[in-house]
Image (cartoon, rainbow, N blue to C red):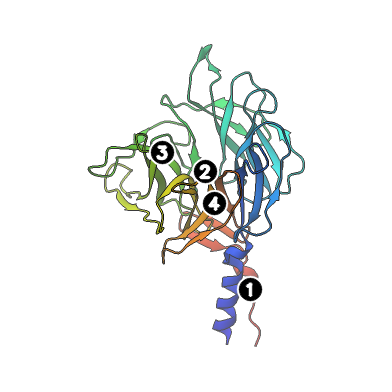
């Protein structure tokens, strides 16, 4: 009986029913930020502007959302509360600032910018700032750095196609391509435990992507990578866009477009049984899903229920 109650409580605190997904959509005419429950229900609009608000990302505690908006004339980094309130501008620069990502402890935000460094314009440069927008500093990397993603343990940053650097932007190593595959690699994100990287192999000729999970080696990121192609079942040919691991690392969230369709919708693909579930069905394009589950905390050793210590069994 104790074990049954314990398992049931563990399922409840780790269940995706407690999760929430943030994404951007053109369903109301232009890119706006929306959120929904992890099963696709309760879809709610969070931003209301005549310009683009896009690429939202949850803070580690799930209480805030960082995103990019061009409401001031060019892309800047904004932050708002999880309910859409208290929207504030963190960057205010003539150059575009975009593709924000939180450090695992929530204290800093990394982003991509075209602003000057030491009097020179350094395109595709990464910058880091405190989560309140202060203390903006360039990262000491020298390579093109679109779409940066912090590793879950905070020691590494991945970007572009695909480089991995330490938290200071040094010691860059490029992740090798799959054997005998000659396509452009585009970073999508880290697994919650930091052992894998999700990316897409992009074929610009056919406009088709293949999603791939790369398991990182444990010998200093030099060799020993293992690759797994994410074979999503579909009766019709599917085109992919903007993917991410689910909050528990057991599924892939992605924007997909069925062959012949004009719009993108958000799907969940469970890795263990290859179950595909469509979460949105809107007339516009739903893109860039990111999931948060406040009942989960992440460590390099794996997922640990935050409420585990609060579970008590009575006789």
Q: Which residue is mark 4?
A: 266
**Callout in the foreground (2, 1):** 2
Q: Is residue 27 above or below residue 13?
A: above
**Callout in the foreground (3, 4):** 4
**Callout in the foreground (3, 1):** 3
Q: Where residue 138 appears, x then y in whole percent?
A: 53, 25
Q: Is residue 96 above or below residue 16?
A: above
Lower position in the chain sequence, tag 3 or tag 2: 3
**Callout in the foreground (4, 1):** 4
Q: Is residue 205 left or right of residue 157?
A: left
Q: Where residue 77 appears, x then y in whole percent?
A: 64, 32
* On-image quarter of the N terminus: bottom right
Which disc number belongs to residue 186? 3
Lower position in the chain sequence, tag 2 or tag 1: 2
Q: Is residue 47 left or right of residue 241?
A: right
Mark 3 and 4 residues: CB-CB less than 8 Å, in contact? Answer: no
Q: Which residue is mark 2?
A: 262
Query: Secondary structure beneath disc 4?
Result: strand
Q: Is residue 82 above or below residue 186?
A: below
The residue sitting at the front extreme is: 260
Query: Secondary structure beneath disc 2?
Result: loop
């Amino acid at each position: 009986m104790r074990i049954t109650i314990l398992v049931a409580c563990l399922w409840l605190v780790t269940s995706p029913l407690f999760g929430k997904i943030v994404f951007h959509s053109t369903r109301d005419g232009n890119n706006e930020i929306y959120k929904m429950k992890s099963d696709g229900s309760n879809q709610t609009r969070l931003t209301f502007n005549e310009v683009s608000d896009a690429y939202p990302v949850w803070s580690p505690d799930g209480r805030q959302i960082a995103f990019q908006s061009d409401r001031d004339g060019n892309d800047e980094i904004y932050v708002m509360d999880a309910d859409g309130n208290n929207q504030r501008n963190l960057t205010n620069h003539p150059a575009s600032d975009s593709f924000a990502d939180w450090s695992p402890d929530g204290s800093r935000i990394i982003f991509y910018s075209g602003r000057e460094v030491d009097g020179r314009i350094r395109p595709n440069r990464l910058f880091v700032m405190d989560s309140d927008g202060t203390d903006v500093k360039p990262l000491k990397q020298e390579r093109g750095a679109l779409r940066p993603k912090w590793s879950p343990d905070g020691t590494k940053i991945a970007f572009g196609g695909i480089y991995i650097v330490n938290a200071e932007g040094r010691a860059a190593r490029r992740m090798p391509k799959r054997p005998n595959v000659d396509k452009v690699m585009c970073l999508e994100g880290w697994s919650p435990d930091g052992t894998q990287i999700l990316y897409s192999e992009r074929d610009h000729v056919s406009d088709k992507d293949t999603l791939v999970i790369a398991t990182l080696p444990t010998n200093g990121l030099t060799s020993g990578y293992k690759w797994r192609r994410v074979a999503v079942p579909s009766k019709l040919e599917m085109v992919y866009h903007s993917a991410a691991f689910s909050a528990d690392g057991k599924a892939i969230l992605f924007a997909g477009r069925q062959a012949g369709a004009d719009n993108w919708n958000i799907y969940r693909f469970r890795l263990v049984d290859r179950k595909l579930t469509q979460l949105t069905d809107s007339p516009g394009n739903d893109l860039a899903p990111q999931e948060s589950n406040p009942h989960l905390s992440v460590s390099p050793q794996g997922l640990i229920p935050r409420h585990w210590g609060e579970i008590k069994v009575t006789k």
